[in-house]
Image (cartoon, rainbow, N blue to C red):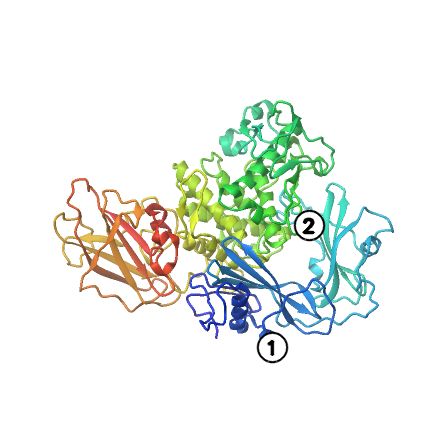
């Protein structure tokens, strides 16, 4: 049975029409209540789910006739067809992820997995597949194939084309697997394309390899030896690498450097935010006056330092170390203060420590466990403040196993400046995005985009910013020219020309992502330009959602559907925002989905025509017009909704009237459906305030009485084709003189689209206490009018 017409399931298909992800967050999936599955057995639930969804994912039924067995690290090559093996059950943020590996010949197929995510109640909320149902097994190698058995460093040197003993190579791990060869993905080749790396420079660590054997064909599967190794490279110091060596010919089919380009009180003088963000057009450039730039330094407490004598720049999360040339001795201080001029190595070091430690501290302050999110990272991570032979660059390498952060390396900010690039917090935030991904998915990029780093920096720095161009992602940089206001009609869409076109490193895709994520921030309060408190709250909330989504995913993906679901899943229970009271989550879920829709997501993925328009809304999306016609652009006067009004008599009039105190009044509500399908099971409720200034749901409201004349429609056609006026709802305004104004709150719900205050939503914000200004404008099912 196809799920495409199920309003409770978001289905994403690949270009071949095969399902690549299913989102059940609207109605989480549970196995039938047969009593055979223990509620606390996550794997049994996931196994049952895969059987249920086998047709959707085109998994042969024979594979799931028995529960998938545990994948063994002791890999044995054997004559075996397509199988699905259970890899791991991994605790994630507010969820559990179970991963299954596709195998051929008994070997794991590279990047071919199914991930099933369960919520805290052991219900399936989403799944993601990168398996190839039609994959044909490669020919079984001969028993004497040279690379079928484990190799030593000299064996690897031979495959790389090195002389015996050449290069300080150290093998960290190796195994056999099956790889689908792509001739266009053998190495990351330097390119002159638009924004090929963080600095706009054509750059990627590569090696000169032998040509592949003539017997190797593009688009075919081969048995390869995956080798993780360490090899220094000029300008980079020690780098960790991954190579796939075809076992019979010794040809290297794939090579990647595992890196991503871009207590007593201890004080440091740093740039907490870049000069342009602080001053706007009057800010000195990176090549500007040292004297003027020195005036912009701020004395701050360096977070989470460890006491040493003399004091070093090291602490719980980060430690300044010399990793790459040039050799620069990490600074220390006998006074516990690091006060240096902006062009010096010591200033670069203080900023590098401050920014990285602050970002780890931000993760903790947002309520996440750093130890859990970075459970494969060894702390403190090394941070080199002067690397790349003093060239302009930055990167976030992996650890030796390629499954956690290996620290951070910073060069200069510009070839004409001695100021370290670590002085720019936005650059540090970009690299920190890679560190988050290394631990989550063992890769520095999402797959659908380079990283979340541009968005992290832009959203963190926007509140109160004086930058003349708010949408310039790196306003203080001459060499990093990226934006977060990209227009879908110009190809900057999920599935658009910029997404589908040539994009080494996926930096164009990163701008699609940062535009999308920045829109979430704008909608929930980032566009409250003169309200710094509101902007700051919205910034921290959006950062929480971004990191919370990463804390849930376990695999790369071609499109962001599962990440959207992961962000929405993180938005529940109680949420901690530093500097603000904790609050019940769930209210921003619909805005998250809408923001990706606005950037072109949810069009059919098998379309050959690049996307240039916003994506379709959900199948069912009922709304009350609050002046935005069902959309979610920021609105400050959310309590003046034209779709809700009062009448002093049940006359069906459409002009709002002031309440008549001491008498029964009558409320009317206009509802519509912007979804693509028909909305059914319509419910409308209206509430009125019980206090002079209603601010909190549900404490400040009581429900109105629906009069016998209320006639609820059986259905509403989608695409805004119909509107219905529902009412009257009867209420009696409070006669107390302190009630100078009265607030009316209306809610509409339908199948697959409950309001955020409906009990069936299962959201924490529904039970509250929830501030209405952080609830009503975030859900088009709700509307409020103060009269």
Q: Between marks 1 and 2, how big is the CA–CA gap? A: 37 Å
Res 409 quadrant in image: top right
Residue 486 at least partly seen: no
Q: Marks 2 and 1: in contact by CB < 8 Å?
A: no
Indicate the position of residue 82 as horizontal and vertical percent values.
65, 72
The numbered dot on residue 62 is 1
Residue 437, visible in the rendered structure: yes
Q: Is residue 304 left or right of residue 105?
A: left
Mark drawn on residue 279 = none
Which badge, 1 or 2, comes first in the chain's sequence? Answer: 1
| Element class at badge 1 | helix
Of 610 and 135, nearer the camera is 135
Which residue is at 53% across, 46% downward? 369
Q: Secondary structure at mark 2?
A: loop
- Report the residue at 58% width, 42% height from top: 481
Q: Give the number of callouts.
A: 2
Vertical position of residue 118 compared to residue 477: above or below: below
Q: Residue furthest right?
A: 164
Relative to 232, is 8 on the left or the right?
Answer: left
Binning the other alpha carbons within 10 Å of mark 1 as few (below 14), some (14 to 19) or many (20 upward) gives few
Q: Which mark is residue 258?
A: 2
* Residue 340 image point, x, y percent: 62, 25
Which picture quadrant has residue 533?
Answer: top left
Other residues around mark 2 within 10 Å, as few (<14) / some (14–19) / many (≥20): many
Looking at the image, residue 229 sits to the left or right of residue 775; the answer is right
Q: Measured along the vertical axis of the image, is residue 783 above or below residue 636? A: below
Residue for point 72% across, 51% down: 241
Task: Provide residue 625's location: percent of width, then percent of height.
Answer: 31, 55
Q: Is residue 278 left or right of residue 110?
A: left
Residue 429 in percent (x, y) is at 57, 41
Which is more foreground, mark 1 or mark 2? Answer: 1
């Amino acid at each position: 049975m196809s799920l495409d017409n199920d309003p409770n399931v978001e289905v994403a298909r690949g270009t071949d029409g095969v399902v690549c992800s299913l989102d059940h967050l609207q109605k989480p999936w549970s196995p039938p209540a047969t009593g055979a599955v223990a509620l606390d057995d996550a794997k049994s639930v996931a196994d049952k789910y895969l059987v249920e969804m086998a047709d959707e994912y085109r998994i042969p039924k024979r594979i799931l006739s028995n529960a998938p067995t545990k994948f063994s690290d002791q890999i044995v090559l054997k004559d075996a067809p397509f199988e699905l093996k259970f890899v791991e059950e991994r605790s994630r943020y507010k969820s559990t992820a179970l991963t299954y590996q596709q195998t051929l010949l008994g070997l794991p197929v590279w990047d071919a997995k199914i991930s099933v995510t369960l919520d805290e109640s052991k219900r399936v909320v989403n799944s993601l597949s990168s398996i190839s149902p039609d994959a044909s097994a490669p020919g079984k190698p001969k028993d004497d194939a040279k690379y079928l058995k484990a190799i030593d460093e000299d064996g690897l040197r031979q495959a790389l084309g090195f002389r015996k003993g050449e290069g300080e190579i150290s093998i960290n791990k190796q195994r056999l697997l099956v790889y689908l060869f792509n001739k266009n993905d053998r190495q990351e080749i330097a390119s002159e394309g638009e924004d090929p790396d963080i600095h706009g420079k054509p750059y990627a660590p590569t090696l000169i390899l032998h040509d592949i054997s003539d017997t190797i064909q593009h688009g075919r599967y081969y048995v390869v030896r995956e080798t993780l190794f360490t090899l220094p490279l000029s300008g980079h110091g020690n780098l960790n690498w991954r190579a796939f060596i075809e076992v019979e010919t010794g040809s290297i089919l794939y090579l990647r450097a595992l890196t991503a380009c871009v207590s007593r009180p201890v004080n440091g003088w740093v740039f907490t935010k870049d000069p342009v963000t602080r001053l706007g057009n009057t800010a000195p450039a990176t090549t500007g006056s040292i004297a003027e730039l020195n005036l912009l330094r701020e004395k701050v407490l360096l977070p989470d330092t460890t006491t040493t004598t003399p004091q070093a720049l090291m602490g719980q999360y980060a430690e300044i170390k010399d990793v790459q040339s040039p050799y620069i001795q990490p600074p220390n201080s006998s006074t516990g203060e690091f006060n240096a001029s902006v062009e010096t190595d010591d200033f670069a070091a203080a900023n590098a420590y401050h920014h990285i430690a602050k970002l780890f501290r931000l993760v903790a302050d947002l309520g996440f466990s750093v130890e859990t999110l970075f459970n494969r990272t060894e702390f403190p991570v090394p941070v080199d403040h002067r690397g790349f032979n003093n060239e302009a660059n930055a990167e976030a390498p992996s650890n030796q196993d390629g499954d956690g952060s290996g620290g951070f390396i910073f060069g200069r900010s510009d070839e004409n400046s001695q100021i370290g690039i670590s002085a720019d917090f936005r650059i540090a935030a970009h690299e920190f995005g890679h560190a988050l991904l290394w631990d989550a998915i063992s890769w520095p990029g999402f797959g659908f985009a380079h990283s979340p780093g541009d968005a992290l920096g832009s959203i963190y720095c926007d509140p109160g910013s004086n930058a003349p161009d708010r949408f310039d992602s790196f306003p203080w940089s001459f060499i990093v020219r990226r934006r977060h206001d990209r227009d879908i009609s110009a190809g900057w869409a999920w599935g658009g020309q910029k997404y589908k076109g040539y994009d080494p490193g996926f930096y164009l895709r990163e701008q699609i992502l940062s535009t999308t994520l920045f829109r979430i921030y704008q909608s929930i309060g980032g566009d409250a330009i003169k309200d710094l408190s509101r902007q700051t709250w919205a910034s921290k909330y959006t950062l929480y959602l971004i990191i919370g989504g990463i804390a849930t995913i376990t695999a790369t993906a071609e499109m962001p559907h599962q990440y959207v679901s992961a962000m929405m899943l993180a938005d529940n229970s109680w949420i901690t925002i530093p500097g603000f009271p904790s609050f019940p989550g769930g209210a921003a879920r619909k805005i998250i989905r809408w923001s990706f829709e606005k950037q072109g997501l949810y069009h059919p993925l098998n379309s050959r025509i690049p996307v240039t328009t916003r994506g379709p809304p959900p199948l069912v999306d009922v709304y009350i017009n609050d002046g935005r016609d069902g959309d979610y652009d920021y609105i400050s006067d959310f309590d003046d909704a034209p779709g809700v009004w009062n009448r002093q008599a049940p006359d069906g009039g459409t002009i709002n009237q002031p309440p008549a105190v001491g008498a029964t009044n009558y409320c009317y509500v206009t509802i519509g459906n912007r979804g693509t399908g028909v909305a059914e099971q319509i419910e409308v409720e209206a509430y009125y305030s019980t206090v002079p200034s209603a601010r909190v749901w549900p404490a400040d409201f009581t429900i109105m009485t629906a009069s016998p004349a209320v006639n609820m429609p059986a259905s509403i056609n989608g695409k805004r084709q119909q509107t219905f006026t529902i009412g009257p709802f009867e209420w009696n305004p409070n006669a107390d003189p302190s009630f100078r104004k009265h607030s009316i709150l209306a809610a509409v719900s339908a199948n697959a689209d409950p309001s955020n205050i409906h009990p069936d939503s299962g959201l924490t914000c529904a039970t509250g206490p929830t501030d209405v200004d952080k609830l009503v404008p975030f859900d088009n099912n709700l509307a409020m009018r103060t009269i």
